[in-house]
Image (cartoon, rainbow, N blue to C red):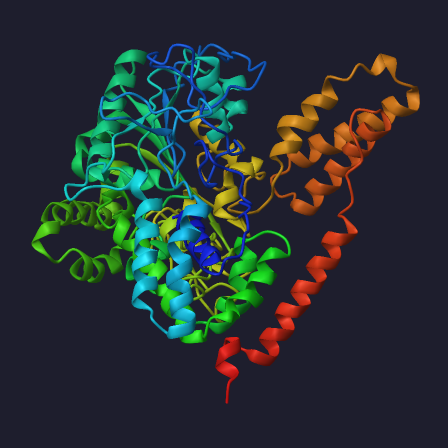
Amino acid sequence: MKKSVLRLSAVLLVVCLLFPVSLVYTGGNSGSANAVTDVLAGAENEKTDVAENTEETTAPVVSIPKGAAFNPGKPASDPEILPTIIIPGIMQSDVILLDENGNRIVDDEGYYKVAFIEPDVGSIVKTLIGPLFNALIFKQMDGLYKAIDEVAADLTKNISNDLNGQPGVPREVIKYPNSYADSTPYEQERILSTIPLHDYIDAVSGENLYFFTYDSFGNQLEIAADLYQFIEKVKAERNSDKVNLVPISLGATVFNSLMDVYPQVKESLNKVVLVVPAANGSKIAAGVFRGQFTRNEEDIYKNLLPSLVDGYTGFALNLLIRILPKQTLLNVLDAVMCAVRDNLKTCTNMWALVPNEDYIELRDTLLDSDEYAAIREQTDRYYTAQGNRYENIQSFIESGVRFFCIAEYNFPTYGFIPNWNDHNSDGLLPLESASLGAYAAPIGQTLPEGYVQKNTSPYISDPTHNYISPDNVVDASAGLLPDTTWYFKDQNHEATGRNDAIISLTSTLISSNRIQNIFSDPKYPQFLVARNARGLKQSMLPKALDIDTSALSPEDAAALQEAIDEVIAVLDNPLADQDAINAANNKLLAVFVKLGLASAPKPESTTDKLLYSFFKTASDMTYKFLGGKGYFDLKG
């Protein structure tokens, strides 16, 4: 899931080729220190800080920004406002390493050590350089494969698990036991960096917002048990019979287990708002567990690396990987995939990301021996829960639980797995998984001519309503919840938290009954668009509103107000696309620059432009003439 595997694969590949490069993560959505980006997260990668009293249970895991304010939100006077529990996605919970005595480990810089991949490029190069030389010169591949296994094991040791599905190294999940209103300023900062529900807190209350945390690489069934207990705790604390749940991405797999293992929880739920849920896992997870890199030559030699590595470096790498003969390169890529897989196959929470239709094949391949009996028993239990998800949701609906879903589409799955383009997705999750069964044309295609919507859901209110997307790609009538599922076109899963329309819709669904379905509010029709307005809404607009206009000239005051009005209008229109967001942003920025409140954006350097143009052209031309061949494949 996410770019965790992509990061590991790219690190191994790059160091194999002795090419120094830093990966740049484009989503900007990580909720945990030093983690890769993920859905609905907003904090940039931060290091883990140690409080003066290291025994303090609420000691910060990452540094607190100076001036972080305590905002309890407005009191919840409306009896209909119920507690809401956020179940975050992968890598959106802080997990830190412990020593043999159970104490938090602190690094040389005074930060807590995070339980994640920590590549030491120098050590990796030292391990791989000799085997790589032997592979290139003497065609001796076994040593290289062994070295790759060693590197992968070292990189993943902090997220490893034993044969019982328990952590392979001691680690601790940082918990947030209190409501947002009763949390420390640091904890509030962390919660809102993961899911920026500022509007919810301002309009309703922080005393009814809770944040459930868990180890993304932990034990799926134990996490579900923890969630059940957390729900009971929140109910007792708030003196409420029911709560709302917001499972995000990987959090939906925990919800699958919760429904199946603890069906009585239905009596404790009011609403469930599924935000880009991994309800049926991810094709990427299945691809990783199969351990085979894509064989598509255009993906390998032209498209993949530029999608993972920022700027001109990705195109330069396209040229560099051709140093390896094609078959050698494929063998190395498969070895990387297998190394990642073998170090994750005892993680039951990662198995929860395997689609139901792929599980039996992969289980019988990877968990067949007796030593994996305990893992197999647990993953089989989740497989059952995952397979029962529709039946369980229907049972919960019959008990009065209201379900809503937010899905994304038309963003291609990362192309390192075979058949990445045979389905529609948001980059990480197939639309079928995230929409609870909607039908869609594969990425880059439309529904066939004469297609008739399926109307297979038992919850369709009006079979004559057109549930097909305006671009003729999605048939929402095939999903389980056609009347309460919204779709955001071109939205990247990893940038979900930067789409203010998704956040606003989520906030409205959990804070009121104003929106009952896709017909309730013309502002939120079933099909919407991708956009990134987070900085505009949370930073630039508040800054503009705080300006003392009495100190401005009439002309400047008028220009400022005009820009503010345009920003407010764009933000108030969920159908406004990225071009409209950019135009409003640039207009306000121009006013800031004129008033001396901001610097004009720096143009891209001439050197960077030239390097980008050179390496992209060289990469494209090399692919045109060499196709899927390495330089040494041209001999003879």
Provide residue 193's location: percent of width, then percent of height: 50, 28
User: Does the rendering let one see residue 149?
Assistant: yes
The residue sitting at 55% across, 13% down in the picture is 69
- Left or right placement of residue 569 versus residue 306 in this view: right
State the residue in front, 526 or 149: 149
Q: Quadrant of residue 599?
A: top right
State the residue in front, 500 or 367: 367
State the residue in front, 302 or 632: 632
- Left or right placement of residue 548 versus residue 536 in this view: right
Provide residue 210's location: percent of width, then percent of height: 38, 21
Location of residue 320 with respect to 600 vertically, above or below: below
Provide residue 524's location: percent of width, then percent of height: 55, 40
User: Does the rendering let one see residue 435?
Assistant: no
Provide residue 377's location: percent of width, then percent of height: 12, 47
Location of residue 100 with respect to 461 vertically, above or below: above
Q: How many numbered circles does the render carry?
A: 0
The residue sitting at 66% across, 64% down in the picture is 616
Location of residue 116 with respect to 562 vertically, above or below: below
Q: Residue furthest left?
A: 370
Q: Quadrant of residue 168?
A: top left
- Left or right placement of residue 394 versus residue 624 in this view: left
